[in-house]
Image: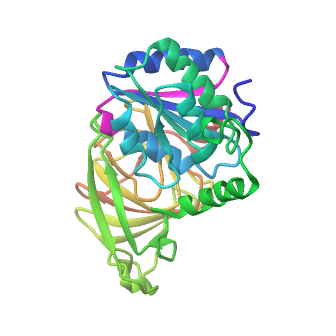
């Protein structure tokens, strides 16, 4: 019953702050009882967890295989929604009763439900969640007098989603890179979420040289990384090493480590990094930043042709901890689960 509003399987990514964690856990139990796939990001500051779920939902918006929605909770349900909504294609709504959830789904195609741990009882929140799951976009709701929307309004709602998706996502690109973009910087490596902003401003032209970071690549040759099929590197500084790295879609980096820690920013494409030393994994897309400490063993899978800028804290090296066959087997096993 819960998944009738979508032809794709449904996945919910959830998180909360300390004021909303109990309510979030209650609602996750309800989702699991409905056999809906859930990913629990746990408890963090309301702005950190809201932004992280917003980022994940934004990245997953075009996945043809699965529909991903979010569930966030804080004291009021407002703060987490504010920060989730900073990402293109994310429509988070704070809903204190089922009618508000029904309106948000019908009118706004809401894909992130925000609830209040201080003002909403578990019983009411359960009904809110049920409504969020079962209400299709453009369906009758309290705002329509519980009647079907007139054709002209239904068409407006349909068009509005396409127009809303462009807000925050209209970027000029050169060779796949945004000329102007404010990147959200997230530090995972030390077990805490921190954010800053890095802005690459290349003006309005489309010449590669106009992107200050991308101009370092212009006219220079990438060299294959022999022990990493599908990978190539352009070193722009030897020590401490700074480089641009490219991997083709489907490539895998077997588990390995480096003598020195490194920072990277994804410029194009998407990938997943498993930090095997910490038992953590990170899905990274354009603009995402990741720091990996020295010696941490990590494995990587590339879902698209992907470019990133990387800076080691010393001279770069690469020490393999498994072969490609073992890496592919481990990744295939996880993808099946």
Residue 140 placement, left or right of 331: right
Q: Nearer the viewer, residue 54 or 313?
A: 54
Q: Which of 39 and 127 is in front in this view?
A: 127
**Farthest front residue in view:** 145
Colour scheme of the rendered structure? rainbow
Look at the picture and state if 274 lies above or below 177.
above
- Residue 330 visible? The answer is no
All told, the count of numbered labels is 0
Membership of 42 in magenta stretch: yes
Magenta residues?
A: 34-49
Q: Which residue is drawn at 37% across and 22% down?
A: 20
Membership of 216 in magenta stretch: no
Q: In which quarter of the image is residue 24?
A: top left
Residue 183 lies, in percent from the top left, at 35, 59
Q: Nearer the viewer, residue 66 or 88?
A: 88
Look at the picture and state if 260 lies above or below 94.
below
Q: Residue at x 60, y 20 (%)?
A: 31
Residue 233 lies, in percent from the top left, at 44, 67
Residue 60 placement, left or right of 256: right
Residue 117 lies, in percent from the top left, at 38, 21
Residue 208 placement, left or right of 79: right
Q: Which of 112 and 176 is in front in this view?
A: 112
- State the quadrant of the N terminus: top right
Q: Residue at x 52, y 44 (%)?
A: 57
Look at the picture and state if 214 lies above or below 91.
below
Residue 133 lies, in percent from the top left, at 63, 30
- Residue 124 visible? The answer is yes
- State the quadrant of the C terminus: top right
């Amino acid at each position: 019953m819960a998944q009738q509003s979508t032809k794709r399987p449904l996945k919910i990514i959830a998180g909360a702050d300390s004021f909303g964690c109990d309510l979030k856990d209650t609602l996750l139990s309800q989702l699991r009882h409905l056999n809906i796939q859930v990913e629990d990001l746990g408890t963090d500051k309301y702005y950190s967890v809201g932004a992280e779920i917003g980022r994940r939902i934004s990245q997953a918006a075009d996945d043809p295989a699965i529909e991903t929605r979010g569930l966030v909770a804080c004291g009021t349900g407002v703060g987490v929604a504010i920060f989730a909504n900073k990402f293109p294609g994310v429509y988070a709504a704070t809903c204190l009763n089922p009618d508000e959830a029904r309106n948000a789904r019908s009118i706004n195609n809401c894909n992130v439900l925000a609830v209040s741990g201080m003002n909403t009882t578990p019983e009411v929140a359960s009904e809110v969640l049920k409504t969020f799951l079962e209400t299709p976009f453009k369906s009758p709701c309290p705002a329509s007098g519980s009647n079907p929307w007139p054709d002209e309004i239904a068409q407006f709602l349909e068009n509005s989603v396409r127009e809303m998706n462009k807000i925050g996502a209209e970027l000029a690109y050169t060779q796949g890179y945004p000329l102007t973009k404010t990147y959200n910087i997230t530090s995972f490596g030390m077990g805490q979420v921190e954010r800053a902003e890095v802005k690459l401003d290349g003006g309005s032209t489309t010449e590669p040289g106009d992107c200050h970071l991308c101009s370092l690549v212009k006219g220079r040759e990438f060299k294959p990384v022999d022990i990493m099929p599908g990978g190539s590197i352009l070193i722009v500084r030897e020590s401490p090493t700074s480089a641009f790295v490219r991997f083709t879609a489907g490539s895998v980096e077997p588990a390995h480590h480096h003598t020195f820690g490194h920072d990277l920013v994804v410029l194009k494409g998407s990938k997943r990094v498993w930090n095997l030393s910490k038992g953590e994994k990170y899905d990274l897309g354009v603009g995402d930043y990741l720091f990996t400490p020295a010696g941490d063993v990590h494995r990587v899978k590339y879902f698209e042709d992907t470019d990133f800028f990387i800076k080691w804290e010393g001279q770069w090296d690469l020490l393999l901890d498994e072969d490609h066959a073992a890496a592919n087997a481990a990744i295939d096993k996880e993808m099946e689960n």
